[in-house]
Image: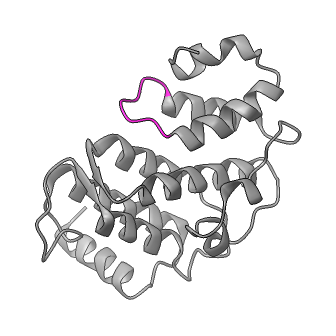
Amino acid sequence: MSSVAVADLVGAIETSEIVDRRTAAQALAIVRDGVITGEGPTTRGRIHFSRALDADDAAWCARILTAAGVESQPVSRAEAEALFAINDAAAERSDGGRFDDLFAKAVVHHAASASGLPVPSRTVALSPDTAIESWAPTRAVGVNIEVLEWIAHMMRGKRVSNRTLMTLVATIVGAATLPLATLPNVFDIGM
């Protein structure tokens, strides 16, 4: 991506001109790059260490995911994958858990909507004031197994795990067609 394109994306983020989910995923990739290097447009004007995720990074992600242009659409797989990449890139966290909350809610928002289940608007679903249990599916009825397998694949062997996301997916998968005994293999965890 050229420096002009990056500047355009940052400008779009700063002025809430994210117009579609593709642009949102690209903007999240810029946040990921800033987390990895500690440099770039999302880290300007502040000290930012490489492989660190702070409250400003979490705020960038929240702003991107709830921009007016995408607010009424479900979280896309590309956006969810970008959040997985940010999660993987951040070895250190100083955001008070805001990114983990946002990450779990966004991935579950994608999974539920991709399964044809109703989901609230992003502003409601991704809000730190909204409990994920108030809208997320808690049983396998209607949840697309392929989407659950994709989440399990994305989580497998990761250094940083998200307990909220793991618990929700394990609950749904446990009720689905996968036998509960296979969950340790799905997530590479010991139960």
Asked whether the viewer can see residue 135, the reply is no
Determine whether 67 is above or below 52 in the image: below
Please identify the quarter of the rendering in which residue 61 is found: bottom left
Question: What secondary structure prevails in the magenta region?
Answer: loop
In the rendered image, residue 160 lying in the magenta stretch gets the answer yes
Q: Residue at x 76, y 62 (%)?
A: 119
67 or 162: nearer the viewer: 162
- Residue 129 in the image: x percent, y percent? 60, 70
In the rendered image, residue 55 lying in the magenta stretch gets the answer no
Determine whether 151 is above or below 102 in the image: above
Determine whether 46 is above or below 185 in the image: below
Q: Quadrant of the N terminus?
A: bottom left
Q: Specify the farthest residue to the right.
A: 141
Query: Would residue 129 be found to the left or right of residue 14 on screen?
Result: right
Q: Residue at x 56, y 50 (%)?
A: 104
- Residue 117 in the image: x percent, y percent? 82, 54
Asked whether the viewer can see residue 129, the reply is yes
Determine whether 19 is above or below 132 in the image: below
Q: Quadrant of the C terminus?
A: top right
9 or 90: nearer the viewer: 90
57 or 32: nearer the viewer: 57
Query: For the image shown, how many numbered marks are present on the structure?
Result: 0
Q: Residue at x 54, y 66 (%)?
A: 21
Q: Residue at x 64, y 18 (%)?
A: 183
Please identify the quarter of the rendering in which residue 88 is found: top left
Q: Specify the farthest residue to the bottom.
A: 15
82 or 7: nearer the viewer: 82
Query: Would residue 87 be found to the left or right of residue 140 on screen?
Result: left
- Residue 12 in the image: x percent, y percent? 37, 82
- Residue 156 in the image: x percent, y percent? 49, 25
Q: Which residues are magenta?
A: 156-162
Query: Would residue 8 be found to the left or right of residue 136 on screen?
Result: left
